[in-house]
Image (cartoon, coloured by chain):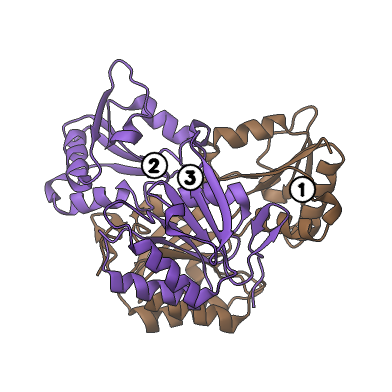
Chain colours: A purple, B brown
Amino acid sequence: MTGALVIAGLGPGDDALITPEVAQALADATDVVGYIPYVARIPPRAGLTLHATDNRVELARATHALELAAAGHRVVVVSSGDPGVFAMASAVFEALEHAPHLSGLEIRVLPGITAMLAAAARVGAPLGHDFCTINLSDNLKPWDLLERRLRLAARADFAMAFYNPRSASRPHQFGRVLDILREECGMARPVIFARAVTTPAEQVLVTTLAEARPDMADMRTVVLLGNAATRQVGRYVYTPRRAG
Amino acid sequence: MTGALVIAGLGPGDDALITPEVAQALADATDVVGYIPYVARIPPRAGLTLHATDNRVELARATHALELAAAGHRVVVVSSGDPGVFAMASAVFEALEHAPHLSGLEIRVLPGITAMLAAAARVGAPLGHDFCTINLSDNLKPWDLLERRLRLAARADFAMAFYNPRSASRPHQFGRVLDILREECGMARPVIFARAVTTPAEQVLVTTLAEARPDMADMRTVVLLGNAATRQVGRYVYTPRRAG
């Protein structure tokens, strides 16, 4: 097989956050595969075929990318943020597991700036101590597992980053998440809602669990929660390096 | 105050992972401040002063950077990886809290590729589901808090990324961490030791908790641990998107 597959992170939105490594891979590609809004970020050019697909077909998209690469194409699968954080890398390796005839293919994952890091940077350093990163999409995990994980994470005093907090298909779940966090962490805990960060639609709101409402988040929002020591200094939010 | 302070992430080592945003800030700087090996990555040029300091003086370094910026310099504080993940951003805001006369200063944090994302990318997608990120340096946290946090994270079935696993000043602690993880997660759990990732000194080892030894890590290593579903496909390691 002469083709190769690259799984690349485009960062949170601003092209100034695309690494030169990813830019080079895109310049070398014959085919770009991904979810419609991410593929829309790639400028068309001669010799490049853009394959944009809908959101709910990650595994089919990954298999398609593997097959194009096996046929000799130089394929880049694009994700927003980092491809290894709730994005396409895991889907590609899952597809590979189901396609053992493609196991000789060379696959490279190129990291990107994942949304929580861009969101944290916007307000200061809320993830400056130990933290955890949780996908709130319940398409991928049962509610009881999510609730148990949230409570254990709170008792471990992790700062937290939440991806995919809320969608039209499950409008009530994020309210239950906030209720659990209020129970475990108290009302004064800092919360950051960072929507479409680094894009023209960016909106960042710093508040507390007492004031946090589910409708402050949508699917373009990353929500950050401080740990017990997280504090504000001026307009910035940071979590001290030391604990305990 | 006419100066400005930027806190920028240089990524894990390869210059191809420095974002254009950070490259521009470095091109505009009059002063670069940071730990010796990170400042050594910045090419000297006319009009740029490099301030390289030792590792154990984060707060003094941060205060110096704030004062330079307040005096009108365009200062970039450089960190390896992402400045908000166990790096300089938190130290700068801590210094700012102790220097209220500087609270009017404009501070921008520019995200970078943190080591765990580069390490995960090298082997596949081991952080493809919920995960936590823990600094094992016990300079910054008491051992009993660390042990409790590890056990709660394991019971929550997080994949895990460990920074600063081992140093000459505390050679035995990482062995105890591995013992706790074996107790909580069993012997078969995949572990990745990723040393100096994306540099010429890069070494990546994929093994299991049964085989993991403390001397596989040093201070340049990031250690990744899978969750209960993490698996190998060919030479890759990935954590499925779905759980439960």
Badge 3: residue crowd in 10 Å (few <14, some 14–19, many ≥20) = many
Question: Looking at the picture, do discs 3 and 2 lie on one chain?
Answer: yes
Amino acid tagged 3: Ile
Badge 1: residue crowd in 10 Å (few <14, some 14–19, many ≥20) = some
Amino acid tagged 1: Ala
Q: What residue sits right under mark 1 in the picture?
A: B52
Q: Of A39 and A21, which appears nearest the observer? A: A39
The answer, for residue A230, to whether it is visible in the render is yes
Q: What residue sits right under mark 2 in the picture?
A: A80
Pinpoint the chain carrying mark 3.
Answer: A
Answer with left or right where residue A239 lies relative to residue B187. Answer: right
Q: Of B172 and B240, which appears nearest the observer? A: B240
In the rendered image, residue B175, in percent from the top left (x then y), is placed at 50, 79
Q: What residue sits right under mark 3 in the picture?
A: A113
Marks 2/1: CA–CA distance: 35 Å
Point out the frontmost of discs 3 and 1: 3
Pinpoint the chain carrying mark 1.
Answer: B
Amino acid tagged 2: Ser
In the rendered image, residue B228, in percent from the top left (x then y), is placed at 30, 71
Q: Secondary structure at mark 2?
A: loop
Is residue A214 shown above or below B105?
below
Pinpoint the chain carrying mark 2.
Answer: A
User: What residue appears at the point 65 percent right and 65 percent down from the top-left corner?
Assistant: A241
In the rendered image, residue B178, in percent from the top left (x then y), is placed at 45, 77
The answer, for residue B201, to whether it is visible in the render is no
User: What residue appears at the point 61 percent right and 50 percent down from the top-left corner?
Assistant: A123
User: What residue appears at the point 35 percent right and 59 percent down from the top-left corner?
Assistant: B126
Label pair 2/1, CB-CB below 8 angstroms: no
Q: Secondary structure at mark 1?
A: strand
Badge 2: residue crowd in 10 Å (few <14, some 14–19, many ≥20) = many
Choose the circle earlier in sequence order: 3 or 2. Answer: 2
Answer with left or right where residue B32 lies relative to residue A168. Answer: right
